[in-house]
Amino acid sequence: MESVIPKKRLLLIDDEPRVRTSLKMVLEPLYDIAQASDGPEGLDIFRKEDPDLVLLDIVLPGTDGLAVLQMLRTERKSTPVIMLTGTKSVKTAVDAMKLGAADYLSKPFDVDELRIVIDRALNSSELEQEVTQLRAQVVKRYAFHNLIGKSQGMQEIYAKIEQVADSRTTVLITGESGTGKELVAKALHYNSSRRERPFVALNCAALPETLIESELFGHEKGSFTDATARRVGQFELANTGTLFLDEIGDLSPITQAKLLRVIQEREFTRIGGVQPIKVDVRIVAATNKNLDDLVRKGLFREDLYYRINVISLYLPPLRERTEDIPLIANHFLEKRLEEAQRPPIEFGKEALELLTRYPWPGNVRELENFIEQAFIWSQHATEITPEHLPTSMKSTSRSPSLRDDTLAGRMSLEKAVMEFEREIILDALKRTNYVQTHAANLLGISRRMLKYRMDTLGIGRPDNSTTQDSELHTQE
């Protein structure tokens, strides 16, 4: 059965019955119409029926249209109001626009103009509501309490974000690559009063020295060879919002000096320009380098360092907060499952142990990449096992743990040898796409011996893998 889109509901507030009748006749085929003859009646209907748009006469008995407009805007600011005015009161209609009216129409009405103005106001209202909803989603996504982690280090980060978010204080975020410094910067922005203003991010290490100044401050047309048009820089784009300067430790001394001046003076000049541009920008900087060392070596300006390091937030590496690893891994897995609309799947105990033991040199970014691989390899599985995780993880993390477990008496030598052999065979099989003949050659043993060891160790071929090994299910 075909669904019926409900009509938009309009409220007409006008004391002239002839005008109400005329408007209803023109608009009723397209909209549901409610009517009121004065301000109090109109306000009562407005509160009960929640119309999508109001047509409001300026000249009303008792409470005039401007007063009713102010009350309507107080009740529900998002509902568009179109003022109806006589030709002699256009100036009053303009005053109404200043009070928040969406538009005005002069009597007598042109039918086509009437429909266009209403349609335009409704579309604009829908767009504003959509933007509001999207902003709310963004705020929820980057709310500091949604940052993942229950470790003491992350709890301290949450508390600091809550304390400093709603201020204009400059913040320096430090930590290794992949720890989530930009996510913290966004949490600072979206939990501040600037949340509806721009958040602009610039990776200082990703741009050559010849472009960084133009990227930060913009340039005027003709200021250098390739400047064919005026360019607005990141500072100007971030005005009234937040500018996130990632990898600030990679800026050259010349750019550092210019950045310091902007922070101090809160103004800058485009390349090739002469007019200073005032800006209100909150700076959040980040680096994976030791700025103290760079200052001592003369590679980073001490005065700039003290300007950006008013509040410092240190993000611990993943290996220092292992209790957070299962939470983060499950978050990434659930996200991919939802996107692909796949049935739920969980990590097996052995897989979680591997994730926890791995040193994570790439931190959260590397973990997300590994979970993506596990998601792909586990398409027909009921749980994620070590076989679904990258070989590099097992070869890096499991071998030392086998040694430690054996020497600590937690595992027998025989069990440790079998586990190590299992890893080597699985690695060879994955490298050869589970073609047993090729894997056996790689290991320097016969295919018969490989098959025997696979059966002994309980190694099978993944359901989703393919092979052209004609001997896969045959006996030599």
Image (cartoon, rainbow, N blue to C red):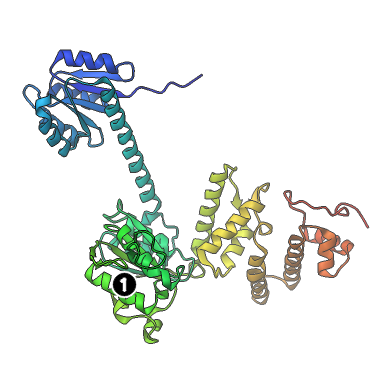
Query: Is residue 305 placed above or below 371 in the rendered structure?
Result: below
Q: Which residue is mark 1?
A: 259
Query: Is residue 345 placed above or below 401 in the rendered structure?
Result: above
Specify whether residue 466 is in view: yes
Residue in front for this viewpoint, 19 or 435 = 19
Q: Residue at x 12, y 21 (%)?
A: 38
Specify whether residue 348 is in view: no
Coordinates of residue 103 in the picture (x, y in percent)? 21, 32
Q: Residue at x 40, y 74 (%)?
A: 251
Instruction: Answer left or right for 151 relative to 325.
Output: left
Task: Estimate how packed mark 1 is, as few (under 14), some (14 to 19) or many (20 or more) residues with alpha carbons within 10 Å.
Answer: some
Q: Secondary structure at mark 1?
A: helix
Quadrant where the C terminus lies?
A: bottom right
Q: Residue at x 25, y 63 (%)?
A: 168
Q: Residue at x 67, y 48 (%)?
A: 381
Residue in front for this viewpoint, 355 or 25 = 25
Coordinates of residue 68 in the picture (x, y in percent)? 13, 29
- In the rendered structure, which amino acid carries the disc numbered 1? Leu
Image quadrant in which you'd find residue 339: top right
Residue in front for this viewpoint, 119 or 476 = 119
Residue sitting at the far bottom: 297
Coordinates of residue 110 in the picture (x, y in percent)? 23, 21
Residue in front for this viewpoint, 250 or 184 = 250
Query: Is residue 294 placed above or below 15 in the rendered structure?
Result: below
Instruction: Answer left or right for 72 relative to 383.
Output: left
Image quadrant in which you'd find residue 175: bottom left
